[in-house]
Image: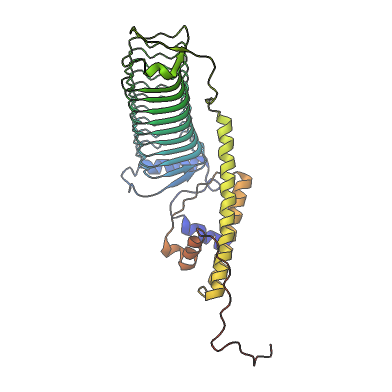
Amino acid sequence: MKLRLLTLFALVPLAFATPQMAAAGDLSDNAQVLRGHRDADPQRRLVIGGDCAACDFSGTNLAGAHLYRGNFSSADFSEAQLLGARFGNMRLDGANFSEASMREVHLSSVTMSGAVLSEANLSDLRAHQVMLQGANVRHANLTGASLVQVSLQGADMDRADLTAATIRSADLREASLRHAELNNVVLQHAIMHGVDLTGASLVGIFLDHVDLTGADLRRTDLQGSRFRQVILSGADLREAEGVTVELLAEACGDTETRLPEIDGLVLTACTAAPTSTVPVDERAFIAEAEARRLEQLEAAQAAFANALASVQSRAMAAGGLEREALDSAREALREAARAQAELARARAQTGWRFEMRRSEVGEPMQFLFEEAQRAPAPPAEPALPAGGPDRSDPR
């Protein structure tokens, strides 16, 4: 147990406590401490976990921070510096990110229903399996963003800038994108029933397997855009610019579809509903994220076992590690594996911070962690002493 605590101490140089050691009130106090250090080193890495609902992180510098497996619903991140931060397997429903700097932020398996991201800088955002139903994304900068398996159902994205963004497997039903910038966007496999794109700029957009049933595209700019398997049943494209015969060649509609008053425009009647696009299921992707986390835990335990075998075989072959150091390293890995297993069984929400430092961990442990990244090597044959075996030994 002493070695376990020592190892964690070496890996946890920051001030936050684990959820088992700190209640939500303690995390709230830590959030208050962060507010007092708004000019902290932006390269300092924090890993924050546990529940911190309604905590105040407004104006803090959390650049590069990792936030995992916690409930941060209604937390205030307004005007926070979050460059390169990562949010994974957590709830941020109703959280406030207004005017936050979130460039290159990664979101994975996160629920953000009703979150406020108005006027936030989300350029180069990477979002995978994110629920943003009813979110306020007005005037947000999403240039170059990548959104995969996201739900923006009913979201308010008026005047948002999504230039050069990539959106795949998305649910945008009833979303509002009035006067938004979607120039050169790649939008694939999306449901956009009833979406409001009035006055939006869609110059150079590529729509691939997109269902725009009942969408409002009046006064949109579609110059240079491309359609592939696009459903326009009941859509309104009156006064839209850039609508050509070539654009509509791979689209279909019905008698309710309204086209610009341009001679020669013909729209093929839709014969079947799309089969490849389905709404994002929140419960399904949360279950998938949990299964993926357990697989990662099992992989980590296997890596620990491989590291032990590799270190032991190398030590026996070359005598590179002293027995005491090898025993300490072996015990440390076993403790770490047991800790991982306990976390998996209890589904604990951990807030440990990992920051490797050679001076703190020491050469044997540093070598051990490096070995964990390699495949185990087969045991080497024992070397014979010079001149052949000593036959004088009676044993």
Q: Relative to 67, does residue 210 appear above or below in the rendering? A: above
Q: Relative to 261, does residue 314 appear above or below in the rendering? A: below
Residue 96 in view, yes or no: no
Residue at image location 38% in from the left, 34% down from the top: 145
The quadrant in which the N terminus is found is bottom right
Q: Position of residue 105 (x, y in %)?
A: 39, 39
Q: In this view of the protein, which residue sits in the foreground, 62 or 363?
A: 363
Residue at image location 56% in from the left, 44% down from the top: 293
Judged from this view, the residue extending furthest toward the bottom is: 392
Residue 32 in view, yes or no: yes
Q: Position of residue 334 (x, y in %)?
A: 60, 60
Q: Is residue 83 left or right of residue 347?
A: left
Q: In this view of the protein, which residue sits in the foreground, 272 or 356?
A: 272
Residue at image location 44% in from the left, 63% down from the top: 360
Q: Position of residue 392 (x, y in %)?
A: 64, 93
Looking at the rendering, which quadrant does residue 238 occupy? top left
Q: In this view of the protein, which residue sits in the foreground, 297 or 242?
A: 242
Residue at image location 61% in from the left, 55% down from the top: 338
Q: Is residue 332 left or right of residue 143?
A: right
Looking at the rendering, which quadrant does residue 187 occupy? top left
Q: Position of residue 333 (x, y in %)?
A: 56, 60
